[in-house]
Image (cartoon, rainbow, N blue to C red):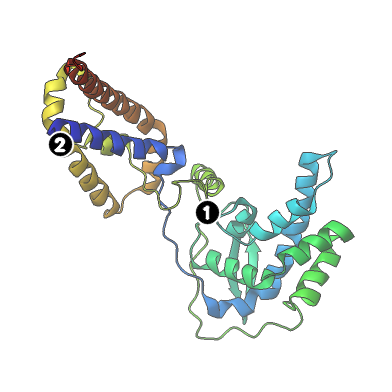
């Protein structure tokens, strides 16, 4: 009976892992600093102008992708809803902006590459969201029906709709603590994070922790190379597997390490390990089920009168 319970628990554990398996499923979100709310008034107008430019160019890009079909208002609404959300690829433009203090002003300086998203990145996102507010459908309708140029869109979004550029920004306080320096991301890291954003919202994706091949190999009886040749030892250790699996998960989540390397290792190596273990579990379940069927077949049938 203990063996049956162990096999079922192992099977359930592996199914849970496989059900969320995708390259991104082993990736944990990198913690980021919060927005500096006090900096928002200094950059609101500049963010609005860049936001209008992004809306215009992203709509044009989408239209070129689906041409000769005409872009729908629904598709434009999708762009407007996501352009200020760093979890979405439409907001990738925010990652290329550095906030630079010049005298009593804060200036948005666009960089060639994406940078590490810290407090400045989140501050721009917050300013963008405050500008857009609940007006995404209004902006989308204006883009769809009026087909404005960038200047007209800036006037509509930043002066008529949001008032973001109706007044001059206040001077920056002299005792303001400078923001962090702009640190470009390596190309591979930027690409990996784009994949993470594109997978946002998929079942099992939020809050996933990535585990490398070595992590899984260190689990008790998980991903071993001995296969069915050492089934006796596997049977002895099966009852410990769920407990050790949870222990490894908890220990891994409590440690900070090189998450970028773990992402790469996990994507390249983890699939094979899980497949091997799934095969072993499948064999155990099949033997268990065969035993049950054999036991049932041995039961005496009803005696005919």
Q: Position of residue 193 (x, y in %)?
A: 51, 48
10 Å crowding of disc 1: few (<14), some (14-19), many (20+) = some
User: What is the distance, in whole Å, between disc 2 and disc 1 at their CAs?
Assistant: 48 Å
Please, which residue is most extreme toward the right here?
Answer: 146
Crowding at label 2, few (<14), some or many (≥20) Cα neighbours within 10 Å? some
| Residue at screen point 41% across, 38% down | 19
Quick one: quadrant of the N terminus? top left
Q: Secondary structure at mark 2?
A: helix
Residue 37 is tagged as none
Quadrant location, the C terminus: top left
Viewer-nearest residue: 180 or 79: 79
Residue 145 placed where, x, y %?
Answer: 87, 59
Residue assigned mark 1: 184
In the image, residue 224 above or below residue 151: above
Residue 68 quadrant: top right
- From this view, report whether residue 257 is shown above or below residue 15: below
Location of residue 56 (image quadrant): bottom right
Tell me if I can see residue 1 in this picture.
yes
Determine the secondary structure under disc 1. Answer: loop
Identity of the residue furthest to the front in this view: 305
Report the mark closest to the observer, 2 or 1: 2
Residue plotted at (62% across, 82% down): 104
Place of residue 200 in the rendered image (x, y in percent of width and height, measured from the top left): 52, 50
Q: Residue at (31%, 50%) from the top-left corner? A: 257
Residue 188, position as x, y percentages in the image: 50, 42
Q: Nearer the viewer, residue 170 or 157?
A: 157
| Residue linked to disc 2 | 239
Q: Residue at x 47, y 69 (%)?
A: 34
As displayed, is residue 113 above or below residue 277? below
Indicate whether 96 appears above or below 180: above
């Amino acid at each position: 009976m203990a063996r049956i319970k162990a096999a079922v628990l192992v099977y359930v554990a592996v199914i849970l892992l496989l059900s969320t398996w995708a390259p991104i499923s082993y990736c944990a979100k990198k913690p980021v600093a919060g927005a500096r709310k006090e900096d928002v008034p200094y950059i609101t107008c500049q963010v609005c102008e860049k936001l209008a430019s992004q809306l215009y160019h992203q709509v044009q890009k989408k239209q070129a992708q689906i041409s000769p079909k005409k872009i729908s208002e629904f598709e434009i609404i999708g762009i407007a809803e996501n352009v200020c959300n760093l979890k979405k690829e439409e907001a990738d433009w925010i990652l290329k902006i550095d906030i630079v203090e010049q005298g009593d002003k804060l200036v948005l300086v666009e960089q060639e590459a994406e940078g590490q998203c810290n407090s400045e990145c989140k501050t721009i996102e917050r300013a963008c969201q405050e500008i857009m507010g609940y007006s995404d459908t209004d902006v989308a309708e204006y883009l769809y029906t009026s087909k404005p140029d960038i200047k007209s869109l800036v006037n509509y979004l930043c002066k008529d709709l949001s008032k973001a550029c109706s007044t001059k920004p206040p001077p920056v306080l002299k005792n303001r603590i400078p923001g962090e320096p702009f640190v470009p991301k390596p190309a591979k890291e930027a690409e990996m994070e784009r994949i993470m954003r594109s997978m946002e919202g998929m079942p099992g994706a939020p809050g996933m922790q990535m585990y490398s091949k070595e992590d899984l190999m260190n689990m008790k009886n998980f991903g071993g190379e001995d296969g069915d040749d050492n089934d006796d030892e596997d049977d002895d250790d099966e009852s410990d597997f769920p407990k050790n699996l949870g222990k490894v998960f908890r220990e891994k989540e409590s440690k900070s390490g090189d998450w970028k390397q773990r992402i790469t290792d996990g994507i390249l190596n983890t699939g094979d390990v899980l497949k091997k273990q799934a095969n072993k579990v499948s064999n155990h379940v099949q033997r268990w089920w065969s035993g049950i069927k054999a036991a049932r077949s041995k039961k005496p049938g009803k005696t005919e009168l």
